[in-house]
Amino acid sequence: MHNSSLSSSLSSAGAASIPELRDELRGRVIEPGDAGYDDARTVFQGGIDRRPAAIVRAADAADVSRVVSLARETGLELAVRSGGHSAAGHSVSHGGIVLDLRDMRTLAIDLENRTAWADTGLTAGEYTAAAATCGLATGFGDTGSVGIGGITLGGGIGLLVRKHGLTIDDLLAAELVTADGRILHVDAENHPDLFWAIRGGGGNFGVATRFHLRLHELDRVFGGMLFLPATPEVVAGFVAEAEAAPDELSAIANVMPAPPLPFLPQERHGELVMMATLAYAGRPEAGERAVAPLRALAEPIADMLRPMSYPEVFTPEQEGFHPISAVRTMFVDGVDRPAAGTIVEHLRASTAPMAVAQLRVLGGAMARVPAEATAFAHRGARVMANVVALYERPEDRAAQEAWVTGFAAALSGEGAYVNFLGDDQQARVREAYPGPTWDRLAAIKARHDPGNLFQLNQNIPPAMKRR
Ligand SMILES: Cc1cc2nc3c(=O)[nH]c(=O)nc-3n(C[C@H](O)[C@H](O)[C@H](O)COP(=O)(O)OP(=O)(O)OC[C@H]3O[C@@H](n4cnc5c(N)ncnc54)[C@H](O)[C@@H]3O)c2cc1C
């Protein structure tokens, strides 16, 4: 339902009035015209200008349950927001309700058992910084501002992936508000079908209000950024060496034009480079040995690798940066010299203000979990490739979408990582869930959300009942 006012929807559904709703909730209700409305409806992805009828900044699971029930009763579209980084803009609705979890940010670390209960309004950066003060870490992604809600429910591929697996491999339990408004404790013993589904199935099964996560001892890492010239030999060599490295080393390589960063020589700005982010989760001397073959691929343009605290590895961010992106995600079976040539060629031909081919070397602990153990089934994938065009003018959309489509086709990858799907990718959601995964997810969806209340996401529609 679009462009309806919340008040009229509430009254026609016989639900509470806005003042009543405000009284019932511990959290805040922000409506059009209220101070902070525009800020509250802004998401990371640029070019999205949706006006929700209300944004509810929930304070606790009871608030979440109330809002879920309200959406069910009124038929208003429900958007669920943790960090707001969905590339598809799924965390803001036009005319519906945004259930914003950002005021729910308690983190309780259990030092003895090395676990944490974390509210899903926390960002990966906030969680990681707090855990690091205890010499502990859970792996999320490479960017601190991403919400732990979205990244965890989709899988979570970051800089500890080869050492400790996906974020979901450290998920021990969750508190989940289901479509009927119940607040469930979900783990291997309680509601095991839901526990399986939320480990990779995204926001389809309910609103996760808290995660119980395993922490690993991690004092320092050896890592940071390494800039190399992006020749096909270097790109292919990097992937091969990173695959051969010990599991302690996780690597993300961004092949892209050199940004105008102060530590890069000015004459190299705009030149195609490989900006790699590395983290070796082990002793610094061993880390130094592990990265030696990568450093030796070519004369580095900038070498910033050193022992550092784990939160320092996160990619530096720019306040207020809201690029529009065209993105394609896939898994590839390594990157040989011809594939690296294809990557370089396509990036050279880009007309976007910024174009990136991101290569994430997988394997290690992630690959040791059986494909059927969670809803993330691409366990054997060797490399994730994401091709991205970042641009500013909405009218460039067709050209940039065509460029990423052509680039992706040339790489002939397969499968998809749900957390990197864009807004026109619904047809590709199935590729995120290969083999029997899709059918199992659709059956669980039919059991727990038969009306598809949670549909503003990379949607898995409920399986149809057989007659
Ligand atoms: C700059 C950038 C860097 C990234 N880096 C990585 C990376 O290194 N590794 C990686 O794996 N991914 C990465 N991602 C992808 C990221 O994991 C997804 O975009 C993720 O969905 C973002 O989570 P969020 O909570 O910030 O997003 P939101 O936009 O708030 O949510 C995304 C989706 O998840 C649902 N959702 C969110 N929270 C909940 C919840 N608590 N309960 C139920 N449903 C919920 C939303 O409804 C929505 O459909 C990156 C994205 C960006 C933009």
Image: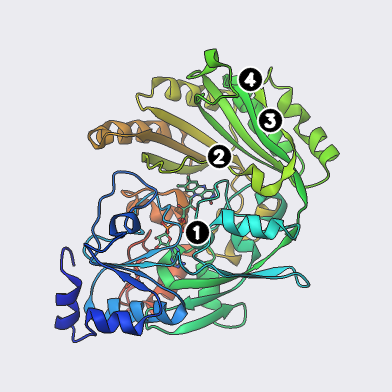
The percent coordinates of residue 163 (x first, y second) are 72, 51
For the residue marked with disc 3, what is the amino acid? Met
Tell me which label, 4 or 2, sits earlier in the chain. Answer: 4
Would you identify the image quadrant in which residue 182 lies? bottom left
Residue 116 seen:
yes
> Is residue 336 positioned above or below 368 on the image?
above
Residue sitting at x 24%, y 85%: 16
Q: Which residue is mark 4?
A: 301
Outermost residue, front side? 35
For the residue marked with disc 1, what is the amino acid? Gly
The percent coordinates of residue 158 (x first, y second) are 60, 49
For the residue marked with disc 4, what is the amino acid? Ile
Question: Quick check: marks 3 and 2 in contact, CB under 8 Å?
Answer: no
The percent coordinates of residue 347 (x first, y second) are 44, 24
The image quadrant where one finds the N terminus is bottom left
Q: Which residue is mark 3?
A: 304
How much space separates mark 3 and mark 4, taking CA atoms?
Answer: 10 Å
Q: Does dot 1 land on a helix, a strand or a loop?
A: helix
How much space separates mark 3 and mark 2, taking CA atoms?
Answer: 13 Å
Badge nearest the viewer, 1 or 3:
3
How much space separates mark 1 and mark 3, taking CA atoms?
Answer: 31 Å
Residue 467 seen:
no
The percent coordinates of residue 371 (x first, y second) are 59, 60
Crowding at label 1, few (<14), some or many (≥20) Cα neighbours within 10 Å? many
Q: Which residue is mark 1?
A: 154
Tell me which label, 1 or 3, sits earlier in the chain. Answer: 1
Crowding at label 4, few (<14), some or many (≥20) Cα neighbours within 10 Å? some
* Number of numbered discs overlaid on the protein picture: 4
Badge nearest the viewer, 1 or 4:
4
How much space separates mark 4 and mark 2, taking CA atoms?
Answer: 18 Å
